[in-house]
Image (cartoon, rainbow, N blue to C red):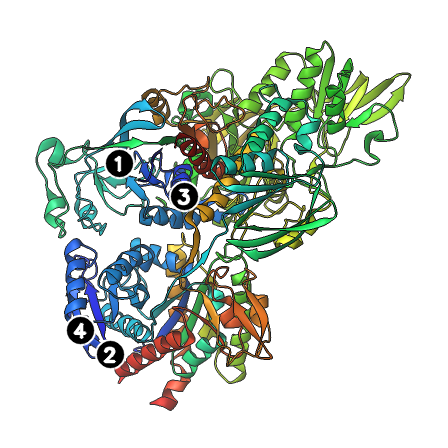
Amino acid sequence: MTSKVVVVGGGIAGIQAALDLGDMGYEVHLVERTPSIGGRMAQLDKTFPTNDCSLCILSPKMISCAGHENIKLHTYSEIESADGGFPKTRVRIREKARYVILSRCTGCGDCIAKCPVKVTFEFEEGLSKRKAVYLPFPQAVPRKVTIDAEHCRMITEGKCGVCKKVCQAGAIDYEQKDSFVDLEAGAVVIATGFDLADASALRQYGLGTCKDVITSLQLERILSAAGPTGGRLTRPSDDTEPKKLAFVQCVGSRDSRMFKYCSSVCCMYATKESILVREHVPDIESTIFYMDMRATGKGFQEFVLRAERSYGVRYIRSRPAEVQPASDGRGVLVTYDTGGGIGEQRTEKFDLLVLCPALVPSKGTSEIARILGVELDENGFIMTPDTRNPIDSTKKGVLVCGFAGEPMDIPDSVAQATGVAARVAELLQEAR
Amino acid sequence: MARIGVFICHCGHNIASAVAVEEVVKFARTLPDVVYSDHNLYSCSEEGLGSIKKSIEENKLDRVVVAACTPRTHEPLFRRLCEQAGINKYLFEFVNIREHCSWIHAKEPNAATEKAKKLVAMGVSKAALLEPQVESESGVIPTAVVIGGGLAGLTAAASLVAQDIDTHLIEMEGKLGGQLNDISILAPNFEKSADLLNKLVSELKKSERGHIHLGAKLVDVKGFVGNFEITVEEEGVQNKIPAGAIILATGTQEHQPEGEYGFRKAPGVVTQLEFERALQRGEVPKRVVFIQCVGSRQPGREYCSRICCNTSLKNALRVVEAGGTAAIIHRDIMSYGAAWEELYRQASERGVAFFRYSLEDKPRISAENKHILVEVFDDNLGEGVTLHTDLVVLATPLVSRDDSGDVSRMLKVPRDKNGFYLEAHVKLRPIEFATDGVFICGSARWPSSAREVMCQALAAAAKAAIPIKRGKVVTEAITAWSDPDKCAGCGNCVIACPYEAIEIVDQDGRKIAKVNETQCKGCGNCVAACPNDAMQQRGFTTRQLSAMIDALVKRALEESS
Amino acid sequence: MSDFNPTILAFCCNWCSYAGADLAGVSRLQMPPNVHVVRVMCSASVKGEYILKAISQGVDGVLVLGCHIGDCHYMTGNHRTAKRIPVVQKLLKDVGFDERRVRLDWVSAAEGEKFQRVITEFVEEIKGLGPNPVREVMS
């Protein structure tokens, strides 16, 4: 009998943990809240410091996950409950009704073309609309559609039914109910990742009040060739190409009133984005407002130097005090201190301002911690207090990898995720 | 004669709306070796798969061509179907007429149909030449070797023995622990490093799976994943250790800042590691100034060594805690993440002073009576500051070990321009080398905190355990082979191979190329490098690809006439 | 010449360009139907002989598409491609073909639009060059 392991979260950490656990011979149940695995990495255009295309390197892993003989995907699913403990935790997985029969859906998209309802597209960070029946992104795994019950007219009002009519595969089922999978897990892995803090709560930065202030993840989507603008970089106020762009680091992070910690990756992704925008608008000028330039990984410092020397990126050590819309409503005015004892306040106009908000434990993290009975640290990350076993949570047999435990970049998340496989093997060997 | 069956998919109307599917089905029947052709509404549906399987059996097909969507997602599905129908899965050929045809020529049905015909003709011509393949399998010696007995190596070895795997830990020094021996307290939790070290060593010693080799010198490494032979010299005797996987955990060394800031010339100027040893001896000076980025983040050595700021924060706090004063002169405080940022916050709150200098204006050191004077222009204040101190600690970067070049050559694994080992992919394969079966963890790859080192070590232990637990290494049959009758032994393929999978061997008095299938990744670089057409790639032979070109030309000529 | 409908062969590497072509399809990006993709694992496995064979038999143009430099799934394969294709182009030129009938470009798995652009531009270029002169000899 193979031992079963439940991995919660289908981002890069969860995917990697599932692949390595599966390769070790464990029966892995990968549980992902959204309709597709891929997580945040799927939203990124490129990755630092090599500017590798994010989906190009992620997509093969997603496909391997789906085709792996030892991995069972539970997408659009959540952990309903967990009882007992190591090495026999009874886990109940809720597979939410997606109103689509997965075995029939071929992902052809006929239903999407005909669906009359348009709603905000989460994957595109609200920059475009999707239909009520949708595929989160073209490379989604599984490549099957999901009906968003909250917005589907047939489900909410009982009228429409267009998707069912056009689906030649007979895959639409408006009567579908949530279903449950019960299993006994030897170990549970938390890989629930991060969300962006709501930067509009920091009113001084103008998100939501100035049109030309966006978040860094929105910029990723804009830069993506497969994104809402097809890779065309324009600013929201008048759809023109920005020529002067600024990034603000530590928006809500390293801030005792919001989030005390450093999110670890913003210095580098802002540097990456400041390089990438040049591929879209060759004469664009980028400025990065930062506190400490934390370029601590392999090739990071060289990457920053390249941004500075070859791409003319201007690094200004200052935390802007205020952001206001320019008088004509196009572009923004950023007021900042020029630094040093002789520093003075200066106001500079930018066409587009990109905020790099604190990255916070994803909203499912506290919920899964409650269900599994593990403790959170003061910042809401899963606590890992044992120096000897750095990926063990406070409960035996419940392990953590990636951003759910603390802020870290992709390679560190991948390393931890692979490490989880070793730790599971240690624990289950011990339990034998 | 092959018996090929061709199945054209409608994909609902995704293909059928642009491509006249039934016309293509008819066309397929005219192609050489095709004995059966049909169409399905959805080939990948239960129904579609069932009907293809039935057709294979009824018509005794020995090769299958499906023209539908992309092989990148659906090839495994149809390959499985072939196996279920009793056909070797490598006798399947996929033709993409959706992504590469109907979807991109949606408004040109005639052209799309003609193109689909050509693509099908090309696929059929290749399929006729496909050969059944056996995936090569090789055994795995159920033993792991870990090179380096510091925190990384110890953690990896402890994990492997806990997973019930025989593990040899090879340490060149006379004792285990590496740099952990020089450090008394570990940040950020201020725990005794000796406690961690003792725990790891005792776990390893009490397991009968653990084999510790102290004072052991790595002499040679031969072989490939599953079947390595590591030669180690202990007390003048060479021993050979057979192993299935190798973990490299050789650590790093501290840069010695010769000539900088009066190092080794003036008293009271030490490196961080020297200061750690002094703290271990209980020598805590009253006043300490730390200078960061000594020998790093400057021309000649551009990288940030990641851990130095955090080490200075830890040690500054220890000085303050002992009743002294501490100042950190830095260029950026690199306290990334949650725990380090908290350490930075604590240091600030407890009175550690911070001054920021720029590369253009480095701090200056001079001696005055029994003090040391440190002058720095603080960028934050915008003015010069003079500090009186008893000790100056130079935070220098971790650099690659002097002997890492030898190890790199022995294991045939690459290093980056700074001498750190180069992983297979910086983003998604941080623990692996491009060479299968050899893994990397700890600061030998990149300077890392104790916690990070341990996570990486666990990861390396997982990667090493996988082939050992599976007991075999299976290679997809897209590997290369060399035809001994054509091979002239020129060695071009050896140079072209990115994986060192090819060697020139003696056979019947002739030199010829030989591919190690376990190491081959199926890129085909050697095929194009071969001047004699001796080198071939399974599933992509020159005959198969030439046949596709011929089929395209033939159909194009038919079409134009 | 207006009805000249070129036949074009494209070698796409499995990891980037083939995936980029797939993305173009998924995104329903429209392009001329003259290009026929052959999937290879790496652009560096494309023998010069294939290109010479195709052109000498009357194929009007050959595209070789690989991962961007630095992105090769096999580390350095595409560096070899980058060296090889100009040599093939020169060979063709030396025997009287227009070397523009062969083109090397890089298309990543995220560049569906670039795939579309490369295909469209190449087809236009080949149309401008007219039919492969070999066709006259053959027919």
Q: Amino acid at mark 2?
A: Asp
Q: Which residue is mark 2?
A: B33
Q: Are marks 4 and 2 on the same chain?
A: yes
- Pick whichever of labels 3 and 1 is earlier in the sequence: 3
Mark 3 against mark 1, which lies toward the viewer? 3
For residue B499, say whether it is visible: yes
- The image quadrant of residue B362 is top right
Q: Amino acid at mark 1?
A: Tyr
Mark 1 crowd level (few <14, some 14–19, many ≥20, 10 Å Cα): some
Q: Quadrant of the N terminus of chain B?
A: bottom left
Q: Is residue B443 above or below residue B119?
A: above
Q: Secondary structure at mark 4?
A: strand
- Please provide percent x and percent y for residue B232: 67, 49
Q: Secondary structure at mark 3?
A: helix
Q: Which residue is mark 1?
A: A76
- Please provide percent x and percent y for residue A181: 22, 33
Q: Amino acid at mark 3?
A: Met
Residue in the picture at 35% in, 46% down: A65
Q: Are marks 2 and 1 on the same chain?
A: no
User: Toward the viewer: C52 or A16?
Assistant: A16
- Please provide percent x and percent y for residue B206: 56, 31
Q: Quadrant of the C terminus of chain B?
A: bottom left
Q: Secondary structure at mark 2?
A: loop
Q: Are marks 3 and 2 on the same chain?
A: no
Q: Is residue A136 left or right of residue C46?
A: left
Q: What whole-number distance in Å separates the C-alpha atoms at marks 3 and 4?
A: 42 Å
Q: Which residue is mark 4?
A: B36
Q: Label 2 lies in what chain?
A: B
Q: Which residue is mark 3?
A: A24
Q: Amino acid at mark 4?
A: Tyr
